[in-house]
Amino acid sequence: MLSSLKMLFSLMITLLFFGILFTTLVSDVRPSPPPVPLPPALKVPSPPKGCKGCSDVRPSPPPVPLPPALKVPSPPKGCKGCSDVRPSPPPVPLPPALKVPSPPKGCKGCRGSLIEKVMARYFQTWKKEQENSTKFRDLLRSTCHGFTKAVVSQDNTPVGAQIVYDGEKRKPLSVTAIFNTFAKRNPFSNKTWDTCSVVGNGGILSNSTCGEMIDSAQFVIRFRGLQERRRPFMESMRRYNDSLMLLPAFSYSTNTAVSLRALYTIEDFESPIRPVFLNPEYLQNLHSFWRSKGLNKRLSSGLMVASLALELCTNVHLYGFWPFDQHPLSHQPLNNHYYDNVPSKKNVHAMPAEFDHLLRLHEQGVLKIHLGECRPSSR
């Protein structure tokens, strides 16, 4: 009896133990959550019935569309090697102020890339820099002495003095015979002008509409010879009234007779124009000054006069100083001068190098270069 009770108790414990274990196993088995439905764009359809090997093959998701600006068109049919060739993005347009037109076809001597580089420098916003202007003016005055020596006068070249030509090695010229043709005093002494326009003779001035602005300048300087009849010469000078006429009488010996002929013609016609002679000593000072800046060839008359203006004037504006045979904006061919197309002697002046120095002064706000058409607001 006791033995039977022990067996029954043992069986109950065993059943109870298995019951607890089964309950624990059952309680840890949880049903899987229902599948989360994919959004329509990514939903993958079930493979069709009877499709062998389809169960693990899922189609690639559709491509994400590119925005319109980056969308690349498909290569045309039959185009070999086109799959990896993508068109270049459209060029970014330049702002109007910097846009340079292409040179015309068949343009001989067109320096497109050089002109584009020059114009990129020129088109920078210009601003007068008074400190730079004052420093450069003081430097010129201390080395070239334009205030006192720019013009031959009776007070800086006395009777009995000798003049040395600055452009050639020649026996000095005695001034005794022509002393009375000299200005009594230097017209620039102790006088400074607010605004001066300096006119070069470049072909860029043709049809530039700059005539009105040029004629309104305080100084009108023309370097043109008097070779034949006098009346046409004087008629061309009539518009300039009592302007100064600077004559390079003592640069070369051949200039002396032509300059004296111009002076006597002005006196005979009783013109109010005042002819004066550039002083060769001043020109030699200018050559030394610009040689120290890297200009080793003889200076052009334009750079001589521009240098003088920088000593005499607070604000200096340059016209007609473009040195190339192609217009900087239209790229059309240009005449050598605005009044003719006679070529200059080769290798006499370093015109592009001179312009580069003037352009540096333009960039520094010391002077202002005018290119293209003139408008009232461009001054």
Image (cartoon, rainbow, N blue to C red):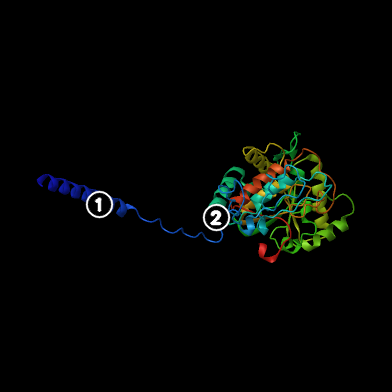
Q: Which residue is mark 2?
A: 130
- Name the residue located 27 percent from the left edge and 53 percent from the top edge: 23
Q: Nearer the viewer, residue 73 or 44?
A: 44
Check the image and report above or below for 41 versus 175.
below
Residue 264 screen position, x and y as percent: 81, 53
Quick one: SS at disc 2? helix
Counting other residues with Cα less than 10 Å from the Cα at mark 2, is it few (<14), some (14-19), or many (20 or more)?
some
Secondary element type, mark 1: helix
Type of amino acid under label 1: Gly
Q: Nearer the viewer, residue 376 or 179?
A: 376
Looking at this view, name the residue that lies furthest to the bottom.
Answer: 376
Does residue 157 appear anywhere in the picture? no
Which residue is farthest left?
Answer: 2
Residue 173, percent across and down? 75, 39
Disc 2 residue type (three-letter): Gln
Q: Which residue is mark 1?
A: 19
Q: CA distance from mark 1 to mark 2?
A: 105 Å
Mark 1 vs mark 2: in front: 1
Task: Judge from the rendering whether residue 216 lies leftward or rightward of residue 23; answer left or right.
Answer: right
Q: Quadrant of the C terminus?
A: bottom right
| Image height of 121 relative to 291, above or below | below
Lateral position of residue 100 relative to residue 266, left or right: left
Q: Position of residue 66 (x, y in %)?
A: 61, 56
Q: Position of residue 292 (x, y in %)?
A: 62, 37
- Asked if one can make out residue 253 in the rendered structure from this viewpoint, the answer is yes
User: To which quarter of the image does residue 215 belong?
Assistant: bottom right
Residue found at the far right of this picture: 229
